[in-house]
Amino acid sequence: MPADHPTPDILDRLLAGAVTDAESKWALAHLLGGCAVCSRYLRGALHAIEPGEGPARYDAAVAGLLERSASGVAAIRAEHLEAAALSEAPSSTGSTAGARLTAMQT
C-alpha cells in the first residue's frame, strides 16, 4: 500500500471484515506497529457503533481475517506436500524430478 497510513475507508472495512487480503495484511501490520493515529481512529469508530456491539464487531472482523489466513496457510501446506510427492515420483526415464534438479544444479 503506498500511503503511510490506511485510509479511513480501509479501516472501516477492516472493522466490517470486508478488506482484501493485501489490505488486511498491510493494515494489521501497520496497527501492530503501534500507530497511535490509526488506533485512535478505530477507537472512535468503535464508539460510534451501538454500545456493546463495537467489541463484538471487532472480534468478528479479526476472527474472520484469522480464518482466511489459516485457510491460506492450509492451501500452501497442501501444495508443498503435493510438490514433495511429485519431486519423488519417477518419470518415464526412471529418475525423480528431485534427482534431475540436483543433476542440473551441479
Image: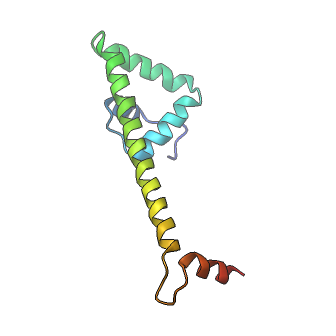
Q: From what the image shows, is residue 68 above or below residue 38?
A: below
The spot of residue 53 in percent (x, y) is 29, 15
Is residue 5 visible in the rendered image? The answer is no
Residue most toward the right?
106
**Residue 4 shows in the view:** yes
Residue 43 vs 70, above or below: the answer is above
The mark tally for this picture is 0
- Residue at 55% in and 84% down: 95
With 101 as the anchor, is 51 left or right in this view? left
Where residue 101 appears, as percent x and y from the top left, is 61, 78
The answer to whether residue 71 is above or below residue 34 is: below
The image position of residue 9, as x and y in percent, is 36, 34
Pick whichever, 10 or 99, lies toward us.
Answer: 99
Q: Nearer the viewer, residue 27 or 44?
A: 27
Colouring: rainbow
Please state which of residues 97 and 62 is positioned toward the viewer in this rendering.
Answer: 97
Residue 14 is drawn in which quadrant?
A: top left
Q: What residue is at 46 percent from the left and 54 percent from the top?
A: 77
Quarter occupied by residue 100: bottom right
- Quarter of the picture holding the C terminus: bottom right
Q: Residue at x 58, y 75 (%)?
A: 98
**Residue most toward the top?**
51
Looking at the image, the residue that sits furthest to the left is: 50
Quadrant in the rendering for residue 65: top left
Residue 3 drawn at (x, y percent): 52, 42
In this rendering, position of residue 9 left or right of residue 102: left
User: In the image shown, does 6 or 76 lie closer to the viewer?
Assistant: 76
